[in-house]
Amino acid sequence: MILKRQLQNSEAYGANILTQNELDANLTYSNRVGKFASNSLWIKRLDAINLRVLQLPLNLTFYLEANMIRKILLLSTLCTAFLSAEVRVLVFSGSTREDSANKKLVKEAARLATQMGAKVAIIDLKDFPMPFYDRDIEEKNGQPTNASRLREMMIRSDAMIIATPEYNASVSGILKNTLDWVSRNEKGQPSRDAFKGKRIAIMSAAPGNGGAERALNHLRSIIEDIGGTVVGTQVSVPDSYNAFAPDGSLKNAQLQEKLKREIEELITP
Ligand SMILES: Cc1cc2nc3c(=O)[nH]c(=O)nc-3n(C[C@H](O)[C@H](O)[C@H](O)COP(=O)(O)O)c2cc1C
């Protein structure tokens, strides 16, 4: 017996609605063919009319066309794959100093990202030395090997965490030079491939009260200009020489919480 509500549900989901007699005639032919995704989802076949019966929890039953079922199953598979896919995050600091506060900051951000299930790679720009951008060098020798290595790593990542120190109110020279090189392709043309479609979390640290916020705002506009999507939350850490606890977290609980929110925004937008 089909409830009126079930019929209305079916209609709402775009199914063909049959009369009770038509259903009775075809239900005799129905057989259960499989158990999908969850224990509570079953599919029965009504071959004669190419209709499928979807039984859901709470005794809800939908009578749907076979094509509709296929679309629902495909959609649910894609959703599951999308939600469980590991986010690959590339992490680096615009300061290469050994005891850099910005390095400590990205390390803590990377720890949080790992905790949230991301696959994280931390690199040091010191390991990617490259000349200052010069069109003559580019035309003569092409892209420096380290620039193209780094650009490839960026292309392969889904997201990035980048910190900058503040030098004379802007981002560090090494960071700007690196971003300039990776914003060009191996044919010596402008290219947004390294940042296009990537989510980026940006942050900064400095010994002064501003926490390098001016540099951070410059970094946001540079990355947006080369195609990256910078997440809304950004963290600036003032008093950077005293900001970190021995376990690597930020001593200031509010800043630590904000950093966690920023990384959540990055990993699970
Ligand atoms: C050339 C130069 C310019 C700087 N300009 C600024 C500045 O404008 N604002 C600021 O807060 N700190 C400035 N600083 C201090 C840096 O913020 C400080 O060296 C910081 O610790 C660098 O980050 P790190 O600890 O990650 O290496 C400057 C330092 C240098 C060497």
Image: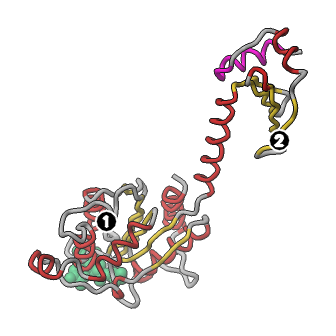
In the image, the residue with mark 2 has its CB under 8 Å from the nearest atom of ligand 1: no
Instruction: Return the residue at label 2.
Output: 34
Q: Quadrant of residue 96?
A: bottom left
Q: Secondary structure at mark 2?
A: strand
Q: Position of residue 12 (x, y in %)?
A: 66, 19
Q: Quadrant of residue 144?
A: bottom left
In front: 250, or 262? 262
Way the structure is coloured: secondary structure
Q: Which residues are magenta?
A: 3-15
Tell whether 164 sits left or right of 260. Answer: left
Query: Going by the picture, which residue comes out furthest to the bottom?
Result: 98
Q: CA distance from mark 1 to mark 2?
A: 55 Å
Query: Going by the picture, which residue comes out furthest to the left?
Result: 136
The crowding category of the residue bearing disc 2, from other C-alpha atoms within 10 Å (few below 14, some 14 to 19, many at least 20), is: few
Query: Going by the picture, which residue comes out furthest to the front?
Result: 48
Kind of residue at badge 1: Leu
Tell whether 247 sits left or right of 5. Answer: left
In front: 125, or 66? 66
Is 212 located above or below residue 246 in the figure?
Answer: above
Q: Secondary structure at mark 1?
A: helix
Is 267 located above or below residue 251 in the figure?
Answer: above
Name the residue at 79% across, 27% down: 53
Kind of residue at badge 2: Gly
Q: What secondary structure characterizes most of the magenta part? A: helix
Name the residue at 36% across, 87% down: 127
Q: Position of residue 255 (x, y in %)?
A: 49, 66
Q: Which mark is residue 216?
A: 1
Is 241 located above or below residue 195 in the figure?
Answer: below
The total number of labels drawn is: 2
